[in-house]
């Protein structure tokens, strides 16, 4: 695989992986595809975990920003409200936040789960009595799959958006870099972790006139549904040159990117 790696996760989520990849001899570029903007709401409009049986954090950003809203002066998560994440990394971030005590029930797919997504979390929830009222913390846009499943089983679901994801424009230096790679037939490995990231990157590539070259690059995706989204966003009749899948955790991403 190419020694060039482009990490497109939001700012703050790439540092450890970038360091490990550079130690392994890769040339790493940290180019967030999306900007995470907090959604500002009045304190009275922030739902309290005390009013729910379960709170689902769809991402680390959802946890960080909601906890800032719900506990501006510090505090402790109520034991009466279980917490859930789509994977063990986000669950560990909750444990490390200081808001969650040993008495908090924390639900998430294990490290050996086939995927870390809403479907995997649903299997965990189905293995126990379903809650009556669920709070889902997420961005202004996102999948409704889990909310729909819960509602279909008679659960009252409240969705609270704590952030908005906005496309991150490439700088003039980044545009010059991709044009250089295209002209010299260099094809980086792009880490892609969301459909919105795909759309943002494709739009920037089209503006830079390198969309055709992008189809020849290599991609590492963290969910199978992203494969078709990638194909559609990059256009063309044939398949994208190479797409690999892995779990959305740094260890799995690192192994996939350094594999020969």
Image (tube, rainbow, N blue to C red):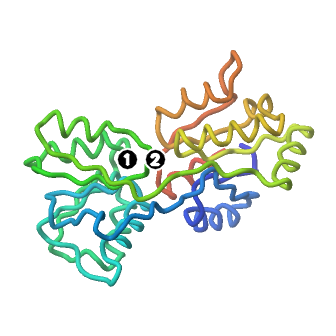
**Could you tell me which quadrant the N terminus lies in?**
top right
Query: Relative to 10, is 224 on the left or the right?
Result: left
User: Is the C-beta separation of discs 2 and 1 under 8 Å?
Assistant: yes
Q: Secondary structure at mark 1?
A: loop
Query: Relative to 63, is 146 on the left or the right?
Result: left
Q: Residue at x 15, y 62 (%)?
A: 51
Eyeballing the image, is 2 above or below 210? Answer: below
Around disc 1, counting alpha carbons within 10 Å, would you say few (fewer than 14), some (14 to 19), or many (20 or more)? many
Q: Residue at x 36, y 44 (%)?
A: 117
Q: Secondary structure at mark 2?
A: loop
Q: Residue at x 41, y 66 (%)?
A: 65
**Could you tell me which quadrant the C terminus lies in?**
top right
Query: Relative to 63, is 254 on the left or the right?
Result: right
Give the labeled residue for mark 2: 247
Residue 213 % position (x, y)? 80, 32
Residue 53 % position (x, y)? 13, 58
Residue 96 has which mark? none
Residue 116 has which mark? 1
Q: Residue at x 75, y 34 (%)?
A: 214
Residue 34 % position (x, y)? 60, 52
Pick the front one: 88 or 137: 137
Pick the front one: 100 or 249: 100
Query: Relative to 120, is 239 on the left or the right?
Result: right
């Amino acid at each position: 695989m190419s020694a060039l790696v482009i990490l497109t996760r939001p700012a703050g989520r790439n540092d450890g992986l970038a360091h490990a990849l550079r130690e392994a001899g890769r040339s790493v570029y940290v180019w967030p595809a999306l900007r995470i903007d907090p959604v500002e709401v009045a304190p009275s409009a922030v739902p309290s975990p005390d009013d729910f049986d379960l709170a689902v954090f769809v991402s680390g950003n959802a946890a960080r920003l909601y906890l800032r809203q719900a506990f501006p002066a510090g505090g402790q998560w109520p034991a009466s409200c279980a917490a859930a994440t789509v994977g063990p990394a986000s669950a560990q971030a909750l444990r490390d936040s200081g808001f969650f005590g040993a008495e908090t029930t924390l639900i998430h797919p294990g490290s050996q789960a086939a995927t870390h997504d809403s479907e995997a979390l649903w299997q965990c929830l189905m293995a126990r009595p379903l809650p009556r009222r669920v709070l889902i913390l997420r961005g202004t846009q996102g999948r409704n799959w889990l909310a729909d499943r819960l509602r279909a089983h008679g659960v009252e679901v409240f969705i609270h958006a704590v952030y908005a994801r906005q496309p991150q424009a490439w700088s003039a230096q980044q545009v010059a870099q991709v044009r250089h790679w295209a002209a010299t037939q260099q094809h980086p490995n792009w880490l892609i972790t969301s459909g919105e990231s795909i759309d943002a990157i494709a739009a920037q590539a089209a503006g830079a006139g390198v969309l055709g070259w992008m189809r020849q690059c290599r991609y590492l995706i963290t969910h199978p549904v992203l494969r078709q989204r990638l194909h559609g966003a990059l256009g063309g009749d044939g398949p994208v040159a190479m797409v690999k899948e892995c779990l959305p955790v740094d260890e799995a991403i690192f192994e996939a990117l350094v594999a020969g």
